Amino acid sequence: MQVIGSRPRLTVSADGSGVVGHAGARLLADLADATGLTSAYSTALRPLRPRGTGHDPGRIMTDLAVMLADGGETITDLAVLRDQSGVFGPVASTPTAWRLLAAIDERGLARLRTARAAAREIAWLQAAETGEGIPAAQAGGRALPGLILDIDATLVTCHSEKEQAAATYKGGFGYHPLLCFLANTGEALAGLLRPGNAGANTAADHISVLDDALAQIPDAHRYGTDILVRADSAGSAKAFLAHLRGLQASGMTIAFSVGTAVTDHVRRAILSLPDHLWHPALDQDGTLREGAEVAELTGAVDLTAYPVGTRMIVRRESPHPGAQLSLFDQDEGMRHQVFLTDTPYGSGGPIQHLEVRHRGHATVEDRIRCGKDTGFGRFPSRHFPVNTAWLELALTAIDLLAWTRTLLLNGDLATAEPKKLRYRLLHVAARLTRGGRRLHLRISKTWPWRHELAIAFHRLAALPRPAT
C-alpha cells in the first residue's frame, strides 16, 4: 500500500513583518500613474478637496479602482491596500472614501469620464510606441479592421432597498445597466446605470451610451478609423440606427451590425428562400460550422424604414440541446437568427464573414461576466448617485486590467480574464526590504509566474510618460 506523504507541520502566528500580500496589485497602481489617470482624476476632483488638505480625491478614486481590479467587492476592502502602506503608500479610510463618492455629482462624473478618456489616449499612444498598438478583434479566423464596439445590457440583483432599484422583466429586483465594451482589448468604454424596469431596447439609452463610448476613443481613432457597432435585437431601434447614420454624416466611418426580431414578414421571407441561396456558415476559427447556413434576405423584406443601404441576413442552425425555440423554429426544426447591417456589398467579405462577425458580439457576455466580478456585480449604497460613481469606478478598474494585458503582458496572460490575473499575478505575496537607499519588493523565487510579473514591472518602468 502506498503511503500518502503528509504536509509539513506548521505553527501559525500573526506576528510576521516585512511580508506583504496582493503585491502584484502595485502594478495596477503604477500603471494608473504612468497613463496619467491618477493626475487626471486629481485635476477633475480638485474642487472636492477642502482647502487642499487631507487625502487627494484623485488618488482615492485610483485606489478604489485598483481595489476593484484586484477583486475587492466593497469599499471596506480598501483596507487591503491601506494596511500595506509600505507598498501602496497612504490610503484613505473607509469613511473618507464614502464621503468622496457621496460628493460626486453629475458634473463631477462628467469630469471623471473626461479624465479617463485622457488616460486612454496616453495608454493607446504607449501601446503604439512600445508595440503594435491596439490589437484587432478576431472573427471567422481573420482580423477585423478598425474598432469593434459591443453594446449590451445586463441585470444586477439588489438584495436590499436601493434608490431606483426596481422589478426586472425576469422577476428579480435591482438595476439594469447598459454597457459598451471595446472588443479589441476588453476596455469598458461606457456604462449607464438604469432602474431594473428600464426597457432593453430604449433608443435614447443606446444613443447616450454610444455617444459616451465614442467620447472615450481618442480623436485620432474616432475619425479616420473604421468603427463597427454591434448589438443584439435591442439595438435595432430605428432611432438608434438613424443616429448612427447621422454620425456618418459628421465624418465618422461608423457602421452597424445589430440583431432584429423574426417577425411574420421575416418568417415568410425565410420560407420563400430557395435552397441554392443558403451557404455554409463559419465558426469563429474560420472552419465550416456544422449544421448551420446563412442567406441574404435583403431583397425579400421591406427595409425602407431603415437607413439607406441596410441589409438583412439570416442564419439557420440545428438547435443545440436546451435551446429556446419559437413556434416557427419548432415547426421548421431549425433555430433562426436575423441581423441588420449597413456594410455594403463587396465590403467586409461574403455574407458568411458578415454573419460570423456579428456572432462575435456574443463575447460581450464574457465581458459583462468579468465586469460583474470587477465592481458592478453589486452596488454599495442606498443612494443612486453613489452607485453611479461606483459604476464609473468599475469601468476604470476594467480599463486598468485591459491596459495591463495590452501594455505589460505576453502569452496567455495577455488574454487572461481577471480571475486568472489575480490568482497568478496580483495576489502574489512578497517580502519588502530596504537596501542601498531603495525599497525592494522581493517575489518568491519559487512562484511559478515570478518572471512574468517581474517583466511586467520592468515594462511598466520603460513606458514613455506623458509630458507634464
Image (spheres, rainbow, N blue to C red):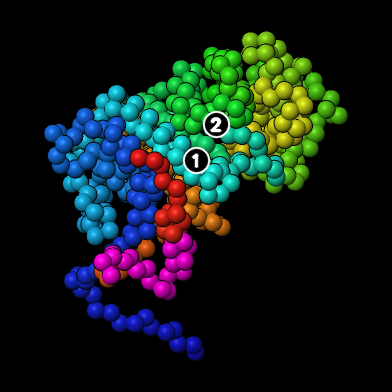
* Picture residue at 34% right of the left edge, 26% below the top: 110
Q: Residues within 10 Å of mark 2 (few under 14, many from 20)?
A: some
Is residue 422 visible to us here? Answer: no
What residue span does the magenta drawing correspond to? 436-455
Residue 432, percent from left and from top: 28, 67
Is residue 264 visible to us here? Answer: yes
Is 449 magenta? The answer is yes
Q: Residues within 10 Å of mark 1 (few under 14, many from 20)?
A: many
Residue 305, percent from left and from top: 63, 10
The part of the image, by quadrant, that contains residue 431 is bottom left
Q: Nearer the viewer, residue 21 or 59?
A: 59
**Residue on which disc 1 sits:** 124
Q: What number is the disc on residue 221?
A: 2
The secondary element bearing badge 1 is classed as: helix
Q: CA distance from mark 1 to mark 2?
A: 10 Å
- The amino acid type found where label 2 is placed reads His
The secondary element bearing badge 2 is classed as: helix
**Mark 1 and 2 residues: CB-CB less than 8 Å, in contact?**
yes
| Quadrant holding the C terminus | top left
Kindly give the residue lying farthest to the bottom in the view shown: 1
Please tell me how many numbered marks the rendered image carries.
2
Residue 288, percent from left and from top: 76, 44
Is 113 magenta? The answer is no
* Picture residue at 34% right of the left edge, 69% below the top: 442
Q: Nearer the viewer, residue 462 or 63?
A: 462
* Picture residue at 50% right of the left edge, 55% below the top: 409
